[in-house]
Amino acid sequence: MNCPQCSQPLENGALFCGNCGQALQAALTPPPLQPGVSTITISAGGQAFSPVPPSTGSAALPLSPLAQVFANPPPTTTQPGYTGLPVGPAASPAMAIPSYALSTAQSVNTKLVLALVFGIAGIIGALFMAILGIVLGVAGIVLATTAPRSERPKLKIAGLVLSTLAILVGLGVWVSVIADTTNLTGGNRGANVGTSTNGVAGTTTPCYSFSFASTSNLNVENTSAACSLNAYNASSLATSSEIYKVLSSTAPTINKANFAGISKTAIEQDIRQSLPSFVITSGYTAQFAGSPAYVVNAVDSATNVAFQETTVLHTTAQGDNLFVLIHAKSGSKTDLSELEANWQWK
């Protein structure tokens, strides 16, 4: 190709003439496609490009592969590792917060609660029945020690302490009952032992005094400072055919209005639990040495033993106001008339 200005030969693709400086851009614009040419194929970079079919008239040459890249830049993508943190994403199942990240309230272990309840119930129950306190205390300790260590340590310590106290109270009550029974049934042990024969000798306590009738020949056993006593007609309670017992205590909640109802329930329950072979034959209100009393009679036909238990409401200078009198003997009938005959309150 020659320069259109000075006709000097030009290099292919030159933009200016090297001889006269003529701009060659307009001159180098390729001519339009000639009619009748159906297809022009340009191969560049291994790709084929075809112009518009001749039916459309003239058409510009297609962009080169490099020009197409700049004319149609690829979509931008976010580089991994540089993704911005989402702000306030909408809640969806796919974005649910894992359970371990949620704040949950600390649960109270059922075993610890039961240990605490058993400990409290055991302490209260031991005052009425020693074995109840011991059983509930042991159950409370077992529950507290088997509960998970990580849950409520203070509650666990409280359960252990209360359960241990329940056991100790139960054991204390048990030992007290055994000691009291031993004092009532086992020998002199510092007791003031006397024999009443033909009504000559009598017995005195801080709450009352009495002597048996002339027909009685009973050993009387009691501690000088106590209002409770035993009387029996042989060398011991176990070998006797006739027995008297007097027990005294304070009962602030008992009064004349509720005395009979409470006494009836307590005596009948005592006989059913302590003497299951005995059948209750009667129960009635009465008087003993001028004070309100409630009497229950029972009998064991198989052994031919009669049993009478009487509660008496009387306040003494000692402070005791509830007395339980028991008379048991061989035969089908028993009463407290002989004991009452010379009874004097203090």
Image (cartoon, rainbow, N blue to C red):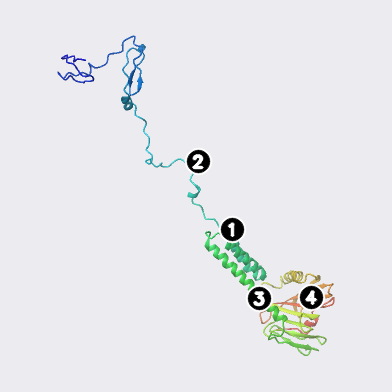
Residue 308 has which mark? 4
Label 4 is placed on what type of residue?
Gln
- From the viewer's side, name the closer residue of 6 and 124: 6
Q: Is residue 128 visible?
A: no
Whether residue 308 is visible here, answered yes or no, is yes
Residue type at the position of mark 1? Thr
Going 67% across and 78% down the picture, which residue do you hit? 179
The alpha-carbon separation of the residues under discs 1 and 2 comes to 34 Å
Q: Earlier in the sequence, mark 1 or mark 4?
A: 1
Q: What's the residue type where badge 2 is placed?
A: Pro
Residue 32, placed above or below residue 292: above
Give SS at disc 1.
helix
> Whole-Å distance between the Cαs marked 2 and 3?
67 Å
**x, y percentage for residue 105?**
51, 54
Quadrant (top left, top right, bottom left, bottom right) of the C terminus: bottom right
67 lies above or below 136: above
The disc at residue 175 is 3
Mark 4 to mark 3 CA distance (whole Å):
27 Å
Q: Amino acid at mark 3?
A: Val
Q: Which residue is mark 1?
A: 110
Judge depth for marks 4 and 3 and give the one in front.
Answer: 3
Which is nearer the N-term, disc 1 or disc 2?
Answer: 2
Mark pair 3, 1: CA separation: 33 Å
Task: State the CA–CA distance, disc 1 to disc 4.
Answer: 48 Å
Under circle 4, the secondary element is strand
Give the residue number, with chain letter if any, for mark 2: 93
Q: The N terminus appears in which quarter of the rendering? A: top left
Image coordinates for residue 334, horizontal then vertical, percent: 82, 77
Do the numbered discs 3 and 1 sit on residues whose CB atoms are within 8 Å? no
Q: Element under label 2?
A: helix
